[in-house]
Amino acid sequence: MNDFPNEAKLFEDTRKNISLKDARSKSIYHAENKNEKKVLALRVDGVLIKNGNKCDYALIVQENAAYLIELKGKDREWASRQLETSLDYFCKCTNLDSYHGRISLSRVQKDLHGTQFKKAEKAFRKRNGTLKYQETPFNDSI
C-alpha cells in the first residue's frame, strides 16, 4: 500500500473485526471486515500529521477507499473540521476511489446539523464518500 512511515502503521492485514480507541476519549470505533479485505490502519494524530487539525485514525481498504476516524467527546463540529482537514491531506497523498469520514461521539448533542458538519459532509460527498456520526461505540462495515 502507500508509502506511509512505519511509525504511523498500526497493522496491515485482513482481520475481520477492527477496533480503534483513544486513551483521551471514551469513544470507540468498530468495523466489520466481513469480506476480509486488506486493511492498512494508520495513527494520524501526532504521527502522520503532526500539526494543525487532524483525525485520530485512518483505514485504507484495499487501496480503494479511506475511512478517516475521529474519536470525540461531544463536539461534532470540531470533529468535522478535523476530518475535513485530514481529508485534504489524504486526497493529496493517495489516489483512492472514495473517502469516508466517521465520528464516534461519547455523547451526541441535539444540534444535529451544524454549519461545519454540513461543509465537511459536502467535501466527503464530492470525493464519492460519506460522513457519518454515531454515539460510541460506532459500529461500521467496510
Image (cartoon, helix red, strand yellow):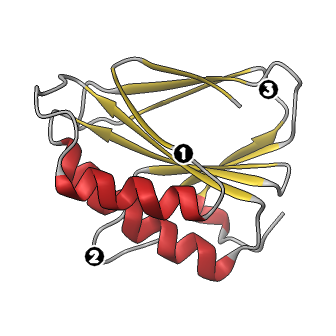
Image quarter of the C terminus? top right
- Badge 3, how many Cα within 10 Å: few under 14, some, many 20+? some
27 with respect to 16 (left or right): left
| C-alpha separation, residue under disc 2 versus residue under disc 1 | 23 Å
| Residue occupying the point 31% across, 53% down | 118
Q: Name the residue rendered at 41%, 51% in the picture.
A: 56
> Mark 2: few, some, or many residues within 10 Å (few <14, many ≥20)?
few
Foreground mark, 3 or 1, reads: 1
Comparing labels 2 and 1, the label whose residue is closer to the camera: 1
Judge by depth and name the residue closer to the eye, 141 or 38. Answer: 141
Q: Tell me the SS state at disc 1.
A: loop
Name the residue that disc number 3 marks.
Answer: 15
Sooner in the amino-acid sequence: mark 3 or mark 1? 3
SS for dot 3: loop
Tell me what residue is drawn at x 15 percent, y 42 percent.
Answer: 75
65 relative to 109, above or below:
below
- Give the side of residue 101 with respect to residue 4, left or right: left
Q: Are marks 2 and 1 in contact (CB under 8 Å)?
A: no
* SS assignment at label 2: loop
What residue does disc 1 label?
130
Q: Position of residue 52 (x, y in %)?
A: 27, 76
N-term mark: 2 or 1: 2
Kind of residue indicated by mark 1 = Thr
- Do we see residue 48 in this rendering? no
Q: Amino acid at mark 3?
A: Arg
Q: Position of residue 87 (x, y in %)?
A: 50, 66
Place of residue 9 in the rendered image (x, y in percent of width and height, measured from the top left): 64, 55
Residue 75, label in figure:
none
Amino acid type, mark 2: Gly
Q: Where does label 2 land, which residue? A: 52
